Every structure is written in structure tokens, then in C-alpha cells.
């Protein structure tokens, strides 16, 4: 008898005697009671701690390694992996189809759930996500979202040109790494396929579009650069408050950590680029095919997907709101948890909570995505936008990067 079966039996009984509990526990006596949980998210530590506190059948050990760590540890050697880059490793994960009928999985935004599906099989379960929001002093409309087209119009109307220099500027794509992440994911349906094909056509087209946007909205690439060099040495939200700039784009999670003295003076709207929201950060969980304790791993996932688990987690982490936000640093992938627990803990999120059907199709991401984006692609993207006349061989740069950054899952 496995642990999830025991849990289900206990939950179905109206009255459980100590003797019956003992008999059920004896049925699990041959279980491997140790688990190792690998994660590149520091917030996961509280979850592991909570799991160890709320049950005694298993003892979970937590192994944390940020993706940029130089220590080569194969995540697949552990029983459970909770990571921001699991979409690139679906072929290395066990099927989780037996968890598809859980309330949690059934309430995951459909476009987000697809990120964990390979073929027809569920391989990873998205737990949390993040969305880009536009900051400004005064909203120009009362819509839930601001579109990329509307954003351009409002940015251009904010600009002030004096003596052939911008003294006020609405926005530039080069100001925000959050915006660039959302834009490229929106414009390239499968970044994974783009890299595998070594074409980088989607990257080139997106860079050209943004270069032309800057020239149209801000006058020229030179004016845009001069403004940034002269004024952007303090945080963007300070520039907005002083009236120097009109807008900024940041993750909702980062907005949540701004001081109240700042957030009180600003307004935010989620940004839509391609007829729907683009998720900019996904934290998902899966069980590697090489897990030494798949039964114990399933027990952890069964516990993890219970609403009570997240209620306890928010209660625990709510004491340190200056250090983290909501569900593992983001909003939940579950619409029902956002409409319930998130709203209860963070009432200000009510107008921002995504509803079913409000996400766009999400780009397919490759292995080592976060490290690859931050270390290689983002600098190349910025260079391509700011200097469109200088051709960059992104394909060659990518091949060199792969040689210097062997995939830890293959070690």
C-alpha cells in the first residue's frame, strides 16, 4: 500500500481510531522513508521544512543550487526537482498522469499547464508564475490590461524634446529586461526550436521590430541612448515619480516588494503583447526518471497539491513579506488558489489576478533556459536592438556557449 493510497483512505473515513491509523501505517512500513528534493528556488526551502513538520513517514532533504552555480550537480540524481527550467527536460521526467484529476491540476491555467505536457503525458506540474506589469503615475484607462500598441501611443505622447534632446521619455525596451523577456517569448512560438535549428530568425525579427519602435517612438536610437546615459542612474520608479520617465516594466513579484511609500504613489497594469498574457517565470515540479524513491516523491506531490498545504505555506511565509511574495515568489499557476488564498493574503492583487483564457500561447523553452537567457541571449538581444547595423552571429555564439556550459542533467 503506497502513501497516497493511505492518505486517501484516511480522508474518506469520518472517524479514524488510533488502532486503525497504526494498522494503516504498518502497511507502509516497507517504504523508503528518505527523499531528496533539488531546487534552484530558495523559496522552496520553506516547503520542504513544512513537509517535514506536517508528517512523519518521510524525511526530506533539501538541495539548493542556483542555476548560475559553478558546482556541477545533476538534478536528475534526486527524487524530486523543483526548478524554473524544467520545460527543457520533459523527456527526463516520469509521467504524472495519475495526478491530473486533482483539484490543483484541474485549476491550472490551460496555457501554463501545456508547458508541462509532452505528447499527451503530464511530465511536470507548474506551481507558480510571474507576469510583467507596467508602472506609471496615472493610468490612462481603466482596462485590466495595457496592450503593446497602447503602450507605444502613451509612451510617445509623454516624450518631450528640447534642443534636440529628450528631456522626458515615456519608455524604451532597453530599459527593462523583464519587458525583453516577455517580448521575445511572445514573438517566438518555440525558442527551443529556434535554437535547435540554429537559424535565430525570430530573434533577428524581434530585434528589428524593437529598433524600429525606438526610432518611431523616441526619435532615434541615438536620442534614446543619450537619454538613458544622462538620466537613468537611479531606479526607474524614482524617475517616474519625478516625472522624468513615464513608464517602467517589472515582474509583479518585484512590484510587491517595493516600499509602501513608493507603491502608494504608482499604478500598475499587466502588459499584453500578443493578445494575451505572457508568463515570464515558471516554477514547476517533476520526478526524474532516475528517482530512487518515486513512491515517496508521489507522496510529496500528493501533499504539495493540497490546498491546505498552500494555506499553511502562506501563513508561514507571510511573516516575512519583505523577502518574498505569495506562492514561491510568484502567483499560483492555479486560478482557484489565486482567487482564494492569494486574494485573502494580498487583497491588492484582485484587479490583477489572471482568469482562464487571459494567457497567450506560451513559448517552448530550451534546457538551461534561465542561465542561457541571462548569460548569453539577453546581452546579444540588447546589442542587436541598440546597434542593428552590426550583425551578430548568434548561432556561433550559442555553440561556443554550449561548450562552456555543459548541461548538468547529462553529467
Image: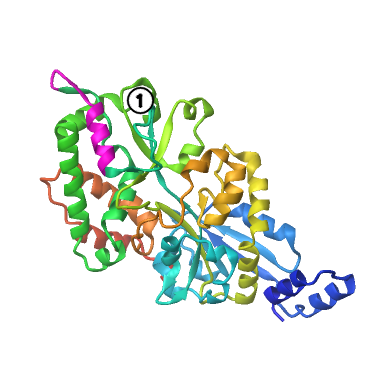
Q: Residue 379 location, x and y as percent?
A: 27, 47
Q: Residue 230 location, x and y as percent?
A: 25, 24
Nearer to me, 63 or 346? 346
The residue lying at 33 percent from left, 44 percent from top is 179
Residue 407, placed above or below residue 181: below
Q: Is residue 183 left or right of residue 64?
A: left
Which of the 4 quarters of the picture holds residue 32? bottom right
Q: Residue 385 location, x and y as percent?
A: 20, 44
Residue located beneath label 1 in the image: 239
Secondary structure beneath label 1: helix
Nearer to me, 356 or 39? 356
Residue at the top extreme, as displayed: 163
Residue 218, placed above or below residue 164: below
Q: Is residue 294 left or right of residue 238?
A: right
Which of the 4 quarters of the picture holds residue 134? top left
Part of the protein shown in magenta: 149-164
Q: Main secondary structure of the magenta part?
A: helix
> Could you tell me if residue 411 is visible in this image?
no
Amino acid at each position: 500500500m503506497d502513501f497516497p493510497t493511505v492518505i486517501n483512505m484516511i480522508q474518506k473515513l469520518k472517524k479514524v481510531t488510533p488502532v486503525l491509523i497504526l494498522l494503516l501505517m504498518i502497511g507502509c512500513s516497507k517504504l523508503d522513508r528518505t527523499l531528496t528534493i533539488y531546487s534552484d528556488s530558495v523559496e522552496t526551502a520553506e516547503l520542504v521544512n513544512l513537509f517535514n513538520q506536517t508528517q512523519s513517514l518521510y524525511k526530506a532533504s533539501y538541495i539548493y543550487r542556483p542555476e548560475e552555480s559553478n558546482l556541477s550537480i545533476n538534478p536528475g540524481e534526486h527524487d524530486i526537482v523543483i526548478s524554473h527550467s524544467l520545460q527543457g527536460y520533459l523527456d527526463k521526467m516520469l509521467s504524472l498522469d495519475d495526478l491530473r484529476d486533482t483539484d490543483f491540476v484541474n485549476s491550472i491555467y490551460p496555457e501554463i499547464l501545456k508547458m508541462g505536457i509532452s505528447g499527451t503525458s503530464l511530465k511536470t506540474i507548474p506551481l507558480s508564475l510571474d507576469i510583467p506589469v507596467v508602472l506609471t503615475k496615472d493610468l490612462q484607462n481603466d482596462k485590466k490590461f495595457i496592450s503593446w500598441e497602447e503602450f507605444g501611443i502613451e509612451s510617445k505622447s509623454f516624450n518631450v524634446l528640447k534642443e534636440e534632446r529628450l528631456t522626458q521619455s515615456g519608455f524604451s525596451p532597453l530599459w527593462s529586461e523583464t519587458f525583453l523577456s516577455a517580448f521575445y517569448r511572445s514573438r517566438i512560438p518555440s525558442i527551443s526550436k529556434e535554437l535547435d535549428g540554429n537559424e535565430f530568425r525570430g530573434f533577428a525579427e524581434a530585434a528589428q521590430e524593437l529598433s524600429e519602435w525606438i526610432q518611431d517612438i523616441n526619435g532615434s536610437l541615438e536620442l534614446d541612448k543619450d537619454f538613458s546615459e544622462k538620466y537613468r542612474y537611479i531606479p526607474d520608479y524614482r524617475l517616474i515619480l519625478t516625472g522624468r520617465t513615464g513608464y517602467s516594466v517589472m515582474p509583479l513579484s518585484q512590484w510587491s516588494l517595493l516600499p509602501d511609500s513608493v507603491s502608494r504613489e504608482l499604478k500598475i497594469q499587466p502588459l499584453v503583447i500578443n493578445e494575451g498574457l505572457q508568463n515570464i517565470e515558471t516554477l514547476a515540479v517533476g520526478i526524474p526518471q532516475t528517482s530512487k524513491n518515486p513512491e515517496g516523491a508521489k507522496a510529496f506531490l500528493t501533499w504539495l497539491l493540497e490546498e491546505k498545504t498552500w494555506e499553511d505555506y502562506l501563513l508561514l511565509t507571510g511573516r516575512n513579506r519583505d523577502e518574498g511574495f505569495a506562492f514561491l515568489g510568484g502567483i499560483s499557476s492555479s486560478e482557484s488558489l489565486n482567487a482564494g488564498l492569494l486574494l485573502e493574503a494580498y487583497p491588492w492583487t484582485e484587479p490583477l489576478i489572471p482568469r482562464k483564457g487571459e494567457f497567450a500561447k506560451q513559448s517552448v523553452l530550451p534546457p538551461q533556459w534561465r542561465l542561457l537567457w541571462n548569460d548569453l541571449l539577453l546581452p546579444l538581444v540588447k546589442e542587436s536592438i541598440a546597434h542593428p547595423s552590426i550583425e551578430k552571429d548568434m548561432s556561433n555564439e550559442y555553440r561556443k556557449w554550449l561548450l562552456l556550459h555543459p548541461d548538468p542533467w547529462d553529467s
